[in-house]
Image: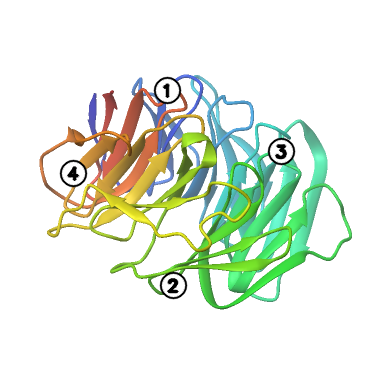
Amino acid sequence: MNFDFDAQVTAALFDASGAVFALGDGSVRFDDRQRVEAHDGAVLCAAVHPSGDGVVTGGDDGRVVWSRRGEDPQILATARNQWIDAIDASAASGLVAFSYGRTLSVIDPADTGFRRDFQHERTVSGVAFEPKGRRIATSTYGGAALWYARIEKQQPTLLKWAGSHTGVAVSPDGAFVVTTMQDNQLHGWRLKDAKNLRMGGYPGKVRSVAFLAGGQLMATSGAQGVVLWPFIGSNGPMGREATEIGYDENSLVNLVSARPAHGLVAAGLTDGRVWVAHPAAQGLNFVKAEKGAAIVALSLSPEADKVAWADEDGRAGVAIL
């Protein structure tokens, strides 16, 4: 299944019904060709709605919008005169978290009166729920912060490390927080003692990370192949070396996608190709073998039986594995 959109794709996702693409022209496109005009401007970030039905998107119009098949878009929240920079949603807690400027906001789509706003000293670049959906990690300049999602007045747990942190992820067991950085490295913290994890040596910027194999591996982009860090036991990658699969000296992995419950990892390359592989097996399954514009959106389905991709020219596809 292929698409040729007339705008760049911000995100490719899978809701409960299939693939969904969020676009720079403000629209949300579903794999059955339905189209929802979600934003007056570009979609900047997207996540699957906590219910699994449709997606929540943040735009440069300062709106957080819920888009579903066969329904009009629903505005869930606004941030006056601010871009919505990052968004995440938790099926476990039913909450949606998003950032604009220095603010992290939390809303409950099932309770229109609920909203929490948490302030940071610097701009928030990334947002991620921990697995139970009770706490939220944010990335910012100088490190990361952890907030309780529903508590109104609180001091966050600060995880400090010098530099500009551009995105954040939480391990499936909730024991580690990992950030991507402006320079070519990752940084992480073990939460029980705030011990630092340094993960460097990348030839390019790390744009995405994804956990797989029950959370025992973390895949990253930013190199000629997919870099895999071991997260086995209480020490995570401390004192351990990363491995690399799918090495190709003529290209870089731009994006990765995986699911904690499965063993597959998908990779989107700067030369436009997309492959899927099992780290323990030999060989790569190229679901898009032809070269072209760089892959800018990528998602493995929850059951790890499909992959959705899009390149920077607006071409996109959904492949069955």
Identify the residue under disc 2. Answer: 182
The answer to whether residue 94 is above or below residue 42 is: above
Please give the name of the residue rendered at 70% of the width and 58% of the height, measured from the top-left corner: 191
What label does residue 18 carry, if any?
Answer: 1
Asked whether the viewer can see residue 101, the reply is no
Identify the residue under disc 3. Answer: 132
Q: Nearer the N terminus, badge 3 or badge 1?
A: 1
Closer to the observer: label 4 or label 3?
Answer: 3
Identify the residue under disc 4. Answer: 273
Name the foreground residue: 168 vs 71: 168
Closer to the observer: label 2 or label 3?
Answer: 3
What distance separates the C-alpha of mark 2 from that of mark 3?
28 Å
Three-letter amino acid code at disc 3?
Answer: Lys
What distance separates the C-alpha of mark 1 from that of mark 2?
33 Å
Three-letter amino acid code at disc 1?
Answer: Gly
Q: Are marks 3 and 1 in contact (CB under 8 Å)?
A: no
- What kind of element bears circle 1? loop
Within the image, what quadrant is residue 119 found in?
bottom right
